[in-house]
Amino acid sequence: MTGTDERAHSADRADLEYGISPPGFRLPKETAIGAVRLQVSDLRRSLAYYHDVVGMRIVTQTPTVAALAAAGQERPLVWLHAREGVRPVSQRATFGLYHFAVLLPDRQALGRFSTHLSSMGVAVGMADHLVSEALYLTDPDGLGIEVYADRPRTAWRRDGRQLVMSTQPLDIRSLMAAGGSSWDGLPSGSVIGHVHLHVGDLGKASDFYHAALGFDIVVWNYPGALFLSAGGYHHHLGTNTWASGGRAAQDQARLLEWELLVPRNDDASAAARSLAAAGYAVEPVSDAWTTADPWGTPLRIAAKVSFDLKARPDELERPLSPRSSQKRITPVRTD
């Protein structure tokens, strides 16, 4: 790290309102979640669910792969990869995905979505997390989905250095009343707000995602869970030890990869160097870096750039991330 980088890093760290910053490299405050890639058993069935129920539109597809986005957006939020013979996964059964979470632009959009689900008779879980209001779904292969809206940051509370989050009953009547007009699909401005993963050990999860990758820890007293973020967000990543089994098998529905977006290529390279220095395998793939956590959950680290799928047909078939973070350490670029 250069002297300039160190000064900027120290100033950024001094601005931390709550949470625990990592000991070394720290992810930039503009860090966000990109797309998630899911392995499913039946592409037609999954497309029907993600379009009709969740409200995503199909950007492009082949016989085995499809990309889905929100209205008016070209950057995919979800990639579906169909594989013959894939078995459904039970909630809390394996390491990897607990749920991915679609963040809507405002509470009104979430209210419209809740009314839409009710009109379709879709079974839904719901919770008030104090920092947000959330609805929970399960796709046809058993993969978890959260759709949520944030409360204003001015309404978030902290207890000492820790952000206050909880799971409380949701006032669904108030939420539905806030919706107003009818649901017309996932609105423009919707993003993947966070990813929540099953892990085998919170200490090892902290070593990888906090100390090596550079997330702040913002909530650490939630039973069996650890929540991490960049830029003071309530969480870009949740980890928990609620799974009862081991790794998802190759022939199970699962999370194939999730994407972490940082402002610049230099930031992605810095994250890769930090991971490699901590002993985790990191590999350059095209214009990004790939790795996997100690339980084999793959991660892609890339810079935020404008995304034109027509100019990137390779995205439909590009190789995905490695299945282990501890096989070997690959030398990393310095650009």
Image (spheres, rainbow, N blue to C red):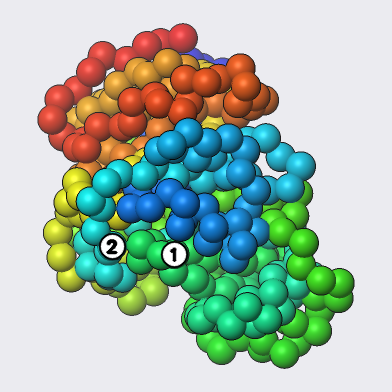
Q: Is residue 204 visible?
A: no
x 46%, y 57%: residue: 45
Please name the amino acid that badge 1 sits on.
Asp
From the image, tell me which residue sits under label 1: 139
The answer to whether mark 2 and mark 1 are in CB contact below 8 A is no
Q: Percent x, y for residue 116?
A: 69, 74
Q: Residue drawn 38% across and 52% down? A: 42
Instruction: Give the numbered dot on residue 103.
Output: none
- Where residue 14 appears, as percent x and y from the top left, is 58, 44
Q: Is residue 49 visible?
A: yes
Total number of numbered discs in the rendering? 2
Q: Secondary structure at mark 2?
A: loop
The numbered mark at residue 88 is: 2
Disc 1 packing (10 Å; few <14; some 14–19; many ≥20): some
Residue depicted at 60% across the width and 26% down the height: 309
Under circle 1, the secondary element is loop
Q: Is residue 270 above or below residue 113?
A: above
Indicate the position of residue 287 as horizontal and vertical percent values.
Answer: 47, 17
Q: Is residue 229 above or below residue 323?
A: below
Would you place residue 129 above or below residue 277 in this image?
below
Q: Is residue 128 above or below residue 67?
A: below
Please state which of residues 314 and 290 is positioned toward the viewer in this rendering.
314
Residue type, label 2: Pro
**Comes first in the chain, label 2 or label 1:** 2
**Gap in angstroms between the C-alphas marked 2 and 1:** 10 Å
Quadrant holding the N terminus: top left
Task: Answer left or right for 223 relative to 265.
Answer: left
Residue 24 vs residue 323: left or right? right
User: In the rendering, at what x and y percent does residue 334 appear?
Assistant: 40, 11
